[in-house]
Image (tube, coloured by chain):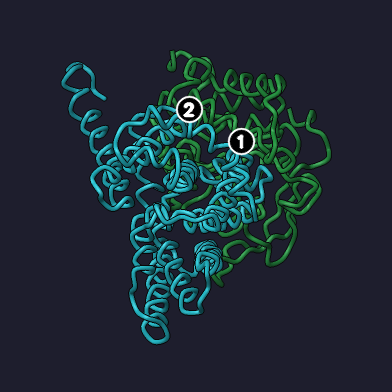
Amino acid sequence: MVIGSALMHFVSPILESIAPFVPGEVFPYYFSGLFQNSLVAAVMVTAVAGFLGSFLLVRNLSLIGDGLAHVSFGGICVGIVMGSSSPLWFALVFSTVAAILIFEMQRTEILTGDASIAIFLTGFLAFGLLVLRLYGGGITIDVEGFLFGSVNLIDEQDLDLIVFISLYSIISLSLMQNALLATTIDPLAAQVQGLPARGLGIFFSVTTAAVVVSMVQVVGTLLVTALLVTPAATAQLVGRSFRSCLIWTQVFGLTSVILGIYLSAEMVAPTGAMIAVVAASIFAAVGVYRSIVIPLLRPGMNS
Amino acid sequence: MSEEFSEEPILSIRNLSVSRSGEEVLESISIDVRRGEFVGLVGPNGSGKTTLLLAMLGVLKPLKGDVLVFGHVPACKHNLGMLGWVPQAATQLPSNIHITVRELIRLGTLNRDNFLWRRMTTEIRERIDRSLEMVGLREMADVDVSRLSGGQLQRAVIGRALASETEFILLDEPLVGVDRASRNSLLRLLDDLCHNHGKTILMVSHDLAAVTQATHRIVYLDGGIQYDGPTEELPDLSELANLRGIEHVHSVSVPSWDEIITEVE
């Protein structure tokens, strides 16, 4: 696949031209030079995660991202032990299979609610850890990179996978957003209208699995939810329609990721954690503004 | 009225038996609904009203007998999208979503042919406006659904079914969580849809007073069909009052539309 380098061919000159105006000592390297791949990957992943997250939030599936991320980590462990140069492919297989099984278990009501997510999360995570301990070298630096994110180490091959997943997800989610909204709001009504509810559900599960895998290197397995749910949840505090929530999600998500990378670069701090902290801080700030500042300014209003 | 109904039934249920979790809930039920009818399906809790609805929607498969919607098995490609489904709005919409009335109604225009790639044609836009107009929510089109009252929310959900331009509308307990004034205006809306817009309506409710007030025909379900006929000829209400789960039976009086209109205004 050369889709990553093809994209960089177009994006790179644009970033170079912005670089002189970028503040900081390390941060400009994300625009010209070493870390261009990292910035592009982070921004793409954030945009997709926010879009997907808006639907997850409405479906009350906020924690499925977390669950699938842990399943992915199990896959990564297996990939590392088998000496794969790109263990993310293993993660993709594990996560997709788990997502479909979770969806089917919930649909057929074998297990309701979050229980199936919990079982897959712990089962695959434990399996990965066992394999790693028994046949591999345990928790090495490589493994830690997948746990906590290693955005600066994203190479061409990783970028290919991330760009491929992001483009696939953005295009397919845009096409299906109305149908997804309809099945989310009222699955039975959507089915009666003629929408293929089961097919849409499986599509959505597979897409979620893929997006989670694409995020693992940017924020790390443990912090996937920070970009998947937090910006969308913040948008719910300000948006008035579904469409405006989608736009606000992008505003909050992209602010979190760019500010997070900037701060981590200048303070030499872990990027994934910084992005997650920034995202949570934005949520807190907006929440305080909505629930304390606005009522104080307009004492007469009820809402 | 009844002589105006066309002969071909749009819903035909023949000797239907349905079981849920191993237990036979419905046994040998037969109902026909013809074009232009406004039918009330009433019965106590646990009498199988919901089961019957789910069988009509094709969610539950018959154990014995047939359900035919527009002459075909429910939810097959010949009648997919020809039925409008109006769930009990108050309990069906997720609370954690911001969506405007217009956005909700627009979802009704989706079907199996256009859900992937749908251009917002003027035809679709007009259809959405028409639905908003019919349910009386034109002024509130851009209001967040979570700010609506119970009655307005139910209207919005009816609007979604109207946007799919189906002629047969199924409603499940549309009056639950709706205050008295809105209840009457909702019934007036349904009456208007039936008489002036040619919709066929089947309404499930345990509110016998409301059903008596609005429908042409009542199907009373309890174990089997206890009564199926014109609303005016429904036998002895006090007898039905002894049955569990029916509300307001003692206070049943059938007000005229004029009375209802003055009450609403």
Which chain is displayed in green in the rendered image? B
Tell me the residue that label 1 is attached to: B231
Helix or strand or loop: what does disc 1 sit on? helix
Tell me the residue that label 2 is attached to: B100
Q: Earlier in the sequence, mark 2 or mark 1?
A: 2
Q: Disc 1 marks which amino acid?
A: Thr
Check residue A252 in the rendering and tell me which mark sits there, or answer none: none
Q: Decide: marks 2, 1 in contact (CB < 8 A)?
A: no
Which chain is displayed in cyan in the rendered image? A
Position of the N terminus of chain B by quadrant: top right
Percent coordinates x, y for residue B51 in the rendering: 57, 56
Percent coordinates x, y for residue A208 in the rendering: 51, 54
Residue that appears at 37% across and 72% down: A122
Chain on which label 2 sits: B
Percent coordinates x, y for residue A223 in the rendering: 34, 55
- Between residues A207 and B195, which one lies in front from this camera angle? A207
Q: Nearer the viewer, mark 2 or mark 1?
A: 2
Q: Quadrant of residue B202?
A: top right
